[in-house]
Image (cartoon, rainbow, N blue to C red):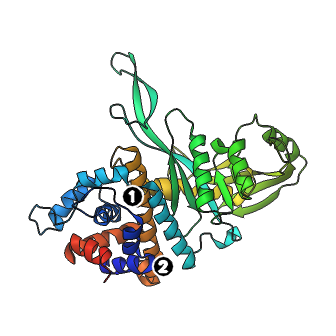
Amino acid sequence: MAKRFRAYARKVFGLDQRVKRDLHDQRLEPRLSLPAIWMTALLMFFFRSPSLNGVDKDLKRRHACGTGKRPAGAPSERTIRRVFEWLSLMEMRAMVKAMVRVLKDNKVALTLAHTHGLVALAFDGHEFFASPVRGCKQCLERDVHTRDPKTGEKHTHKEYYHRVAVCFVVDCLIPILLDVEPVLPGEAEINAARRLLERVLKDHPRLFDVATCDALYAEKEFLQIIRRANKHFVVVLKDERREVYDEALRLRRHIKPDSWFEDGRRCTVWDIGDLHSWWKGPKVPLRVIWSEETYRQPKKGRRRGQTVSVTSTWVWLTIWHFGHKRWHIENRCFHDGVRHWGFDHCFHHHPNAICAFLFTLSIAMILVHTFLKRNLKEPVRKLFTAVALRLQVFRDLGTLMSWSDWVHAGFMNDS
């Protein structure tokens, strides 16, 4: 499986040539090549290694016949950290963009049939590791209040953490983490989201049709950037103080709702259109989708099998379907990324290295899921999940080939 996966990455994505062509080395007289260093970090995500130290130990244990030494030409974890500190994020974004282009050229649908051909991107924020001790020049700070359980005395200490705005392709067969933008000290998350949106519109102007985001992004300037690009947006509307919320609440009483069942839920939806409140500049008609959904969920504190009826109310600016699919960024990106890909792990506490490792993780996710869903036949695909596939490739790498066979012969040579 490891040889097949390696051949697929070379043939379909041209990964070996792309690494040599797109990643440039700024070191003077380097002893180890940049492609070998970056490929070692990529293998860390392929094989679910917990950290760079784990990769270093694994290279010594499995790929050097138990000699306790690192294979010739393999980088140490210190070298990987040092190189990722100055690795160009622009070049990493270009690699992700090129891989998305390959997916589109190979007819991989970036949206499902029930979305009527519309491609949606979800924008959201995510907080990484926090520490009361270690910080860097781009760490965010906050005061944490604690209480001594014995004396009851209150304590306050500073905590350092990182937060990024993330762009993720919604409802796609392949999970694609398209871009990230760090939140800088002294600014709000919406500022980073604006920079991220403007860069995505510049790098991927024709990739998507709809931008969907949480209530935090229901901000005029952010939404106006989307409208100036002739894109649509879907925003959760929670703040009852907003004029458009109050106007939709009043008009809902005069509109007959539609009802249907979907995914075990009874949905009652009011489609309220031609709203012109809460918008400066040219008058742009807004739509509000007011949805009341009734479903059953397990009742807490009761025996298994007992359920209780729950009704939830959602208010969106525009499309109902994409409003719910916004949660794909939480499930397929944040949850799966943290659980299976080390999304929250601090591989190296440096502002540039944090984003460089995230882009490397994105490339690994694209490669693994594309190979699983596009290369393996249906009977074989049923035997593997993405996690099981990575474990199988890891076993093959330890028994059938060495690290140097994978990196140098598989990715660096033209033959």
Q: Which residue is mark 2?
A: 374
Q: Which residue is mark 1?
A: 341
Image coords of residue 69 (percent x, y) = 11, 61
Number of callouts: 2
Q: Nearer the viewer, residue 98 or 233?
A: 98
Real-space CA distance between mark 2 and mark 1, rounded to the nearest whole angstrom: 21 Å
Asked whether the viewer can see residue 344, the reply is: no
Contact (Cβ within 8 Å) of mark 2 with mark 1 = no
Quadrant of residue 47 within the rendered picture:
bottom left
Q: Residue furthest left?
A: 67
Residue placed at 53% from the left, 60% from the top? 178
- Of mark 2 and mark 1, the one earlier in the sequence is 1
Q: Is residue 106 above or below residue 162?
A: below
Residue placed at 45% from the left, 60% from the top? 91
Amino acid at dot 2 = Arg
Other residues around mark 1 within 10 Å, as few (<14) / some (14–19) / many (≥20): many
Quarter in which the N terminus is drawn:
bottom left
